[in-house]
Image (tube, coloured by chain):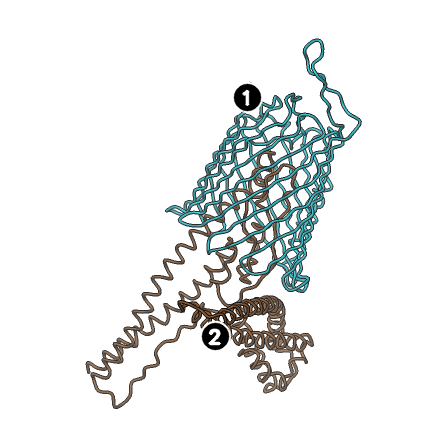
């Protein structure tokens, strides 16, 4: 509830800020209806439902620091299910960012983020807090590079064994060799430490079953990710991405390699229509022969194997748009080699004021 | 630096500090920044001139079929010099970027103070003599307009129409020639207008595509784990900053929406970059290209188009008038 209180205070602040000099504020509201054909993400006996969503966002910015700025974004959303009301939930997001120049082409950037997801009918959800201080180096208009350090924490209301901390760092480079062509490359690495203990597998027992035991050590995953993307605007907006992630865990069954590919195409059509297509595909390869049932972290541990999305939007006014979206997901189930599917069809309005 | 000149001339005689002491302080600061920028630009122009000479020399050496040992040495020296010059120019450009940012910030505050002071003058309750008030009012107005022109440049480039006047001794063929001259320039502006319209159309399409790409991810970020993963790396800050109209007002660049690393355990914090303010040209405010920079370009191009249209219409009317006079 503290997040709701924070939200209300922020809302009041945002309303009061336009009167203050130097502050810029905007609000964004969206309302949507969607049909989900697999609410509980199950392999069999799919349950479908009608869902209503309301989301509002308040943004504010001030350049009160010499050669720098401060900005804050608060967004809150409510999702209500027609039949499965136990799934009704609320999300509160608070982001703040302070950035200032320290030398001619060096800037410091300090973002912080907090998110709380809570369910209305039962004690479920999580809190997520993170910060990623970064040093930016911008030697010219065409090149931007960033050295950053990541710290984050996940705290679940139930299932404390899934709580974890992340500590890492990374480097990224953005380069625009030609107009309308942007390259982005990033490496990110770090260590995830869980509250639960690591698993150790024994060989098959007499009953020909694999035995699993807990070690005395906490589960630690060493993650490394390399990502490369190319953005081109030519006839339409194209964004290609390719990534490779490798995770080495001290817990059996959690080490994997995962290549990933993404594509986003967005094109303006006649009658103020805009069509967007998104596709993502991951190929996850586990390193261990014996795999325990995937310990699904509440809310967070699901990884898309594939996403296909098609959206058609129309701008009714400069600040008002309506859109229709169809999305298909394929996700990894706890049984590792079996995947469930779900589809969503939604219709929504978006208003900026 | 017109505005610097105005400040130089206006400052000693004005009583701006009577109203709000911050005006005087900020005027001095803005003036200092402009002088610094001016000297940097001069230094940059000098370096570019030198760079041009060196480039010519390099070209001269390279165009030869064979070079003696001494000529080789000279060529190497010239290449080193060209590199050094390039670094110096880049350093000056960085300093200019930094000063531009400071100028925009100080200028905006100064503008708001000018406006407050002008509002105060408009208030009839002031017990100053009318002549003094009017003088101060005019002075403030001139400085405010000069600052506004500097902060919010109207066109992408200056549009200058032909200065053709009818003289009493002009014969009918003279008048027709002048009419033709004006019509030629009008046609040239109309052609440019067509190109500007095409460019605007293309930019609007691009802005629309980029806006949808950002909104798509923002809307899907909140509720479900799948969507969190999907949206990760396409940070909310870009969208928020675009919503804020931040770049539209300042011509400032924002970070491009980029698909992030997509690792489940990475933090979905915003990707940000340093600020760099491009004040004079929308075309230059597009690196790296983002929704904010595209919107900024559209706004500048729209202003340019309005001005071009007005000048073309005026030329058309004047050409018609000359023809009419020639026909009499």
Q: Which residue is mark 2?
A: B53
Q: Position of residue A131 (x, y in %)?
A: 70, 47
Label 2: chain letter: B
Q: Is residue A152 left or right of residue A238?
A: right
* Along the line of sight, the residue nearer the viewer: A116 or B42: B42
- Who is closer to the viewer here, A107 or B79? B79
Query: What count of labels does the image hold?
Result: 2
Marked residue chain, label 1: A
Disc ID at residue B262: none
Q: Do marks 1 and 2 share a chain?
A: no
Say what secondary structure mark 2 lies in: helix
Please state which of the two labelled residues, at mark 1 or mark 2, is closer to the viewer.
2
Q: Position of residue A108 (x, y in %)?
A: 68, 56
Where's residue B152, x and y in %? 52, 68
Q: Quote the CA–CA distance across marks 1 and 2.
A: 75 Å
Labels 1 & 2 near each other (Cβ < 8 A): no
| Label 1: few (<14), some (14–19) or many (≥20) C-alpha neighbours in 10 Å | some
* Residue at point 59%, 80% (across, down): B7
Assign the N terminus of chain A to one quadrant of the image: top right
Tell me if B105 is positioned left or right of B300 in this view.
right
Check the image and name the residue furthest to the right.
A216
Who's the residue at 40% across and 49% down the image? A235
Q: Quadrant of residue A189?
A: top right
| Category of crowding for the residue at label 2, using alpha-carbon neighbours closer than 10 angstroms: few (below 14), some (14–19), many (at least 20) | some
Query: Helix or strand or loop: what does disc 1 sit on?
Result: loop
- Image coordinates for residue B119, horizontal then vertical, percent: 60, 73
What is the residue that sits farthest to the top in this orientation?
A: A207
Chain the render paints brown? B
Q: Which residue was labeled with disc 1? A: A46
User: Compared to B118, does A264 lie above or below?
Assistant: above
Q: Colour of chain A?
A: cyan
Q: Residue lying at the far bottom in this picture: please name it.
A: B169
């Amino acid at each position: 509830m503290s997040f709701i209180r924070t939200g209300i205070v922020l809302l009041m602040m945002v309303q009061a800020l336009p009167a203050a000099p130097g502050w810029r504020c905007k609000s964004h509201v969206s309302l949507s209806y969607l049909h989900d054909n697999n609410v509980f993400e199950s392999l069999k006996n799919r349950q479908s439902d009608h869902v209503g969503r309301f989301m509002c966002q308040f943004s504010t910015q001030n350049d009160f620091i010499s050669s720098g700025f401060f900005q804050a974004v608060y967004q809150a959303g409510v999702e209500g299910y027609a039949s499965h009301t136990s799934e009704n939930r609320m999300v509160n997001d608070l982001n703040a960012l302070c950035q200032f120049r320290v030398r001619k082409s060096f800037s410091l950037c300090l973002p912080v983020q907090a998110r709380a997801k809570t369910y209305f009918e039962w004690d479920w959800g999580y809190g997520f807090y993170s910060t990623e201080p970064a040093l930016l180096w911008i030697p010219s208009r065409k090149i931007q590079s960033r050295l950053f350090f990541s710290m984050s924490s996940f705290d679940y209301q139930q299932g404390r064994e899934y709580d974890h901390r992340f500590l890492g760092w990374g480097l990224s480079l953005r380069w625009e060799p030609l107009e309308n062509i942007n390259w982005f490359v990033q490496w990110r690495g770090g260590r995830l430490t869980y509250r639960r203990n690591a698993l150790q597998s024994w060989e098959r027992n007499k009953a020909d079953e694999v035995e699993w035991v807990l070690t005395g050590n906490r589960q630690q995953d060493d993650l490394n990710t390399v990502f490369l993307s190319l953005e081109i605007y030519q006839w339409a907006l194209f964004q290609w991405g390719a990534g490779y992630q490798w995770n080495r865990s001290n817990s059996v069954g959690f080490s994997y390699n995962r290549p990933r590919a993404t594509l986003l195409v967005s094109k303006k059509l006649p009658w103020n229509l805009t069509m967007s297509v998104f596709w993502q595909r991951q190929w996850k390869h586990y390193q261990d022969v014996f795999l325990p049932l995937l310990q699904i972290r509440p809310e967070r541990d699901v990884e898309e194997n594939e996403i296909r999305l098609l959206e058609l939007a129309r701008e009714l006014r400069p600040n008002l748009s309506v859109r229709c979206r169809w999305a298909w997901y394929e996700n990894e189930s706890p049984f590792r080699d079996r995947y469930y599917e779900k589809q969503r069809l939604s219709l929504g309005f978006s208003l900026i004021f | 630096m017109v505005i610097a000149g105005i400040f130089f001339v206006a400052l000693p005689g004005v009583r701006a500090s009577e109203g709000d002491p911050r005006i005087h302080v900020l005027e001095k600061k803005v003036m200092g920044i402009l002088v610094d920028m001016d000297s940097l630009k001069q230094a940059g122009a000098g370096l570019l001139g030198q760079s041009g000479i060196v480039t010519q020399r390099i070209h001269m050496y390279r165009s030869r079929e064979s070079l003696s040992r001494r000529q080789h040495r000279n060529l190497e020296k010239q290449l080193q010099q060209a590199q050094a010059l390039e670094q110096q120019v880049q350093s000056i450009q960085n300093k200019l970027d930094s000063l531009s940012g400071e100028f925009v910030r100080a200028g905006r505050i100064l503008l708001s103070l000018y406006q407050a002071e002008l509002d105060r003058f408009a208030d009839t309750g002031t017990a100053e003599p009318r002549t003094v008030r009017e003088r101060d009012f005019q002075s403030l107005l001139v400085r405010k307009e000069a600052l506004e022109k500097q902060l919010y440049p109207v066109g992408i480039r200056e549009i200058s129409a032909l200065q053709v006047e009818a003289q009493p001794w002009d014969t009918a063929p003279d008048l027709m020639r002048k009419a033709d001259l004006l019509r030629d320039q009008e046609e040239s502006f109309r052609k440019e207008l067509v190109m500007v319209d095409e460019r605007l159309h293309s930019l609007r399409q691009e802005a629309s595509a980029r806006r949808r790409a950002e909104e798509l991810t923002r809307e899907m970020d909140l509720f479900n784990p799948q969507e969190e993963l999907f949206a990760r790396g396409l940070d909310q800050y870009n969208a928020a900053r675009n919503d804020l109209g931040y770049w539209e007002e300042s011509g400032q660049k924002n970070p491009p929406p980029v698909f992030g690393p997509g690792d489940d355990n990475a933090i979905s914090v915003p990707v940000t970059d340093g600020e760099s303010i491009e004040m004079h040209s929308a075309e230059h405010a597009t690196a790296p290209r983002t929704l904010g920079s595209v919107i900024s370009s559209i706004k500048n191009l729209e202003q340019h188009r309005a001005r071009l249209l007005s000048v073309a219409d005026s030329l058309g009317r004047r050409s018609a008038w000359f023809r009419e006079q020639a026909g009499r």
